[in-house]
Image (cartoon, grey):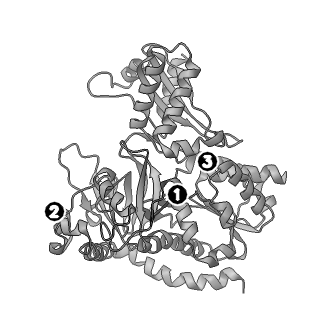
Amino acid sequence: MNITSIATHIFNARMRAIEKHITGGEQLQRHVLDYLTEQGRKTEYGQRHGFDNIHGYDDFASRCPVNSYEELKADIDRMRHGERDILWPGRVKWYAKSSGTTNDKSKFIPVSAEGLQKIHYAGGFDTVAIYLRNNPKSRIFDGRALILGGSHAPNYNLPGSLVGDLSAILIENINPIVNLVRVPKKKTALLADFEEKRDRIAREALHKNVTNLSGVPSWMLSVLNRVMELSGKTHLEEVWPNLEVFFHGGVAFTPYRHQYEQLITSDRMHYMETYNASEGFFGLQDDPTDQAMMLMLDYGVFYEFLPTDNTQQNTQPIPLWEVETGKNYAMLISTSCGLWRYMLGDTIRFTSTNPYKFVISGRTKSFINAFGEELIVDNAEHGLEYACMATGAEIREYTAAPVFMDSNAKCRHQWLIEFATPPADLAQFASLLDKKLQALNSDYEAKRYKNITLQPLEIITARHGLFDEWLRQHGKLGGQHKVPRLSNSREHIEQLLSLNNA
């Protein structure tokens, strides 16, 4: 009997519990809420908001406000300085550095010991459990897992609290047994310099029996291209003949699928999407024939959903058991890491309620997150303002979108700008904008590091009146209609470019 066959028995018990998601979603979520509010009574936040008097969802919704990061920031800062029992019982040691908000370059998401185990690691465990159920002939544990991660951020550390990318926190705290079946070694995995890390990972993994990959598609592709350079092979299965699955998340896989299929031609290769973020692990693809993911309901995450298709004012969030398929909702989470009714920023659309399955439909704000850079409109506006002031330029309209990776794993942001007063030196303007965006957004800064994957941004000058003409063609000229500023899709910018060249 191979190692994977033995390990499968460990995961089978969990599969029986996952089956309760099909018909018992409401019960699971009510149980999670009861547990969270019980723990919340032991905290300052719970005392401020009367958690002692919460006895169900209606009480919770009436007493606990909806929060953005800004509303929780002061409490999180106190936690980072070592104070106990603020948002979650006890002292929270770890904080995941995530993309900045409108006010901060970075935000720090608390990762409690309980949340680490019962949310983040639980999601990883269930991902493997479901994969093994769907692939009973799997041999993933008979080889190594190539797992990409981020790095610690020691410049943000405070006495008693540590900061890092979520993936680095997971690697730092993982069961030592896992290190026996993973690659690269821990020291390499936590390197901050991605150029050095990429080369080291490729060299360490090159001659190992890698059976599975885990990571963000854009960064993984960069590493795999380095593996191919070192090996001199044409296809990845020539390097790792037993490779069978890529567990991916973080950014949409669609733009990368064709490149992966060109790189890995084996018909035994599988792809499985997960929905994990600094704030928690929320869903996974349980059916390889269905792109929708199953919402995981027993991780210590209580979900609420704010309808975004409703034009009425003062729309209130609703619990899971009131959602409908086909509608877009902004997702709110309350977690065992101390986030209470936290606006995550993602919008989702349910495709099924038995079980609860969904697709990510967008963000609550215009953004670009094709490569994990989380560039928001506020970053763009401040960056353009800075470049204009420095060069004397004036902008009339603009839009930006990603240019997805080519065969060499290179990518960039493409900006189409209609200037009222153009800069004397467009290259200087582009450089100033790029540097300001890095100063404003730590995730963009990380992805731009040494041009390893995300190249310098590109600016194309739009002819006068282009955006008005585009709006007119779409029946949106005038009124409150606006040009999409940032988009994760190239749909709008391709239409504009075509019109610009006509």
Local SS, label 1: loop
The amino acid sitting under disc 1 is Asp
The amino acid sitting under disc 2 is Ser
Real-space CA distance between mark 3 and mark 2, rounded to the nearest whole angstrom:
44 Å
Q: Nearer the viewer, residue 341 or 130?
A: 341
Indicate the quadrant containing the C terminus: top left, top right, bottom left or bottom right. top right
Q: Which residue is mark 1?
A: 165
Q: Earlier in the sequence, mark 1 or mark 3?
A: 1
Indicate the quadrant containing the N terminus: top left, top right, bottom left or bottom right. bottom right
Q: Residue at x 41, y 49 (%)?
A: 361
Instruction: Judge left or right: residue 230 versus residue 262.
Output: right
- Compared with residue 229, is residue 210 higher up or lower down, i.e. above or below? below
Q: Position of residue 53 (x, y in %)?
A: 14, 73
Q: Residue at x 77, y 68 (%)?
A: 209
Q: Nearer the viewer, mark 2 or mark 1?
A: 1
- Binning the other alpha carbons within 10 Å of mark 1 as few (below 14), some (14 to 19) or many (20 upward) gives many
- Binning the other alpha carbons within 10 Å of mark 3 as few (below 14), some (14 to 19) or many (20 upward) gives some
Determine the residue located farthest toward the front in the rendered image: 159
Q: Nearer the viewer, residue 338 or 302?
A: 338
Q: Position of residue 234 (x, y in %)?
A: 81, 51
Could you say which disc has been placed on residue 88 in the image? none
Q: Is residue 124 visible?
A: yes
Q: Which residue is mark 3?
A: 256
The quadrant holding residue 385 is top left
Could you say which disc has been placed on residue 62 in the image? 2
Q: Are marks 1 and 3 in contact (CB under 8 Å)?
A: no
